[in-house]
Amino acid sequence: MTGQVIKTRWVLGLTSLGFFMAMMDAMIVTTASTAIRTDFQISVKSLQWALNAYNITIAAVLLVGVALGERWGRRRLYNLGLLIFTIGSVFCAMATTLDWLIVARIVEGLGASVMTPMSMAILTSTLPVEQHGRALGIWSGVGGLALIVGPSLGGLIVARLTWQWIFWINVPIGLLALALSWLYLPESHGKVEPINLLDHGLIIIASAGLIWTLSAATSQLDLSQFSSVLLIGLASLGSGIWFICRQAKEKMPMIPLSFFQERAFTGGNLATACLYAAMYGVVFFLPQFLQLNGHANALTAGLELLPWTGTLVIVAPFSGRAVDQFGERWLAMLGLVFQGLGYWLIALFVHKNYGWLVLPLMLAGVGLSMAGPALQKAVLGAVPRVAIGKASGIYNIFRLLGGALGTTLAVIVFYQFHGSDFTTGFQATMLATGAISLLGLVGAKKLKQN
């Protein structure tokens, strides 16, 4: 085996590992949610922040992480992300209150926000152009594997140990990955752009503040509390408007508004937000439903999700070729319809035994596996090649903020309909998430077709 082949395998393996860890941590918590809620004696509404804090942080900090990596060195920032992620995992495992856990999840999110884009940048800058397609396919496949393994592994850990071990497991893996990355990953730099701290502060306030306001507004508030929530909501909205106005005037904007003049870019990102809003809303509640109403333990609940998540292995490899043959629009629209229909069928069969849910779960999984690659290709293909990195960051922001907003909306619907019955609330939530998925058709119609 030649030295070049060995180097390629180390680069591919280590960058894929970082991406896998970042994706895994978003999914492994799902089957541990019931155990965390029971341990901390908290409501479903409070629990959502253990998931949202991670995703919002990644979305808000992702672009500044990309800018720092281009300036300071991609390997250096990738390793810093691994270190912060590992430290955050220790804090999560040691958490004794929900507030502590949320802060620790924010720390994890800070690390993960640079692990994903830097791993992709290191991979593409190191390998020859002719190897990019195959390497990125493997890299994406490893990240997708986290969607399959995460819930099942989380269930296994909770069933055999305690929920804290879903975070402790990150520590030895993170430290090993950090040591090997220093040894085997090459350093590289990219185009240096100015870092505007004000813009990044504004987008963090706007994204986190608006989602928090939406969640808090559904609580039973007295007049003084309502005033505080309204004030935070208006401040967040103002921050978002200010951010957009600044982007329109800046010579080197963090999010170029000119991108959104392209119909495929705007439509693809909006459809992406709907696709993942629906998915994250379901992944937050479905494991709880299987455990509380199906009387499954955490491990069984994780395995019962496999008809949904496992379709990625079968469908995703064919999605790229199908997009080339049939066009992005039709594959994205069909995927959104399949996902929405699958969720509605789950709502229909909610009082049946688990066997009735297998085909709807598979249908929803096929939809996600079809629409995801089609929308990503549509967004990245709508901008000049030199802008693909920034477009990828914007795509991921829509994906993650869509997921956080979807979780919040799912919780709102659940509390409006659940009464004293979890199943009734879950059924309403599945109907709502199915509708959100179909709402993505509005954006998908703007995509190009062959």
Image (cartoon, rainbow, N blue to C red):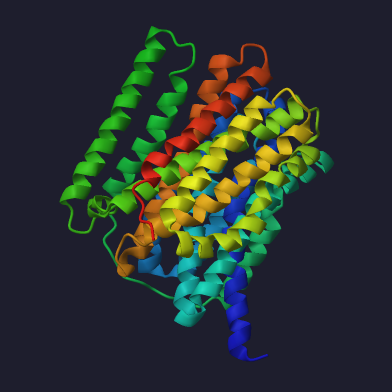
- Name above or below for residue 128 compared with residue 360: below
Determine the residue positioned at 53% across, 16% down: 416
**Which quadrant: the N terminus?**
bottom right
Report x, y in % for residue 93: 67, 42
Residue 93 visible at all:
no
Residue 165 located left or right of residue 125: right
- Name above or below for residue 13 compared with residue 98: below
- Name above or below for residue 129 compared with residue 114: below
Report x, y in % for residue 405: 46, 34
Residue farthest to the right, as pictured: 160
Residue 321 visible at all:
yes
Report x, y in % for residue 381: 36, 62
Report x, y in % for residue 333: 46, 46
Determine the residue positioned at 74% across, 48% down: 153
Determine the residue positioned at 36% across, 18% down: 228
Residue 382 located left or right of residue 211: left
Determine the residue positioned at 36% across, 64% down: 388
Residue 223 located left or right of residue 318: left
For residue 9, which quarter of the picture?
bottom right
**Which quadrant: the C terminus?**
bottom left
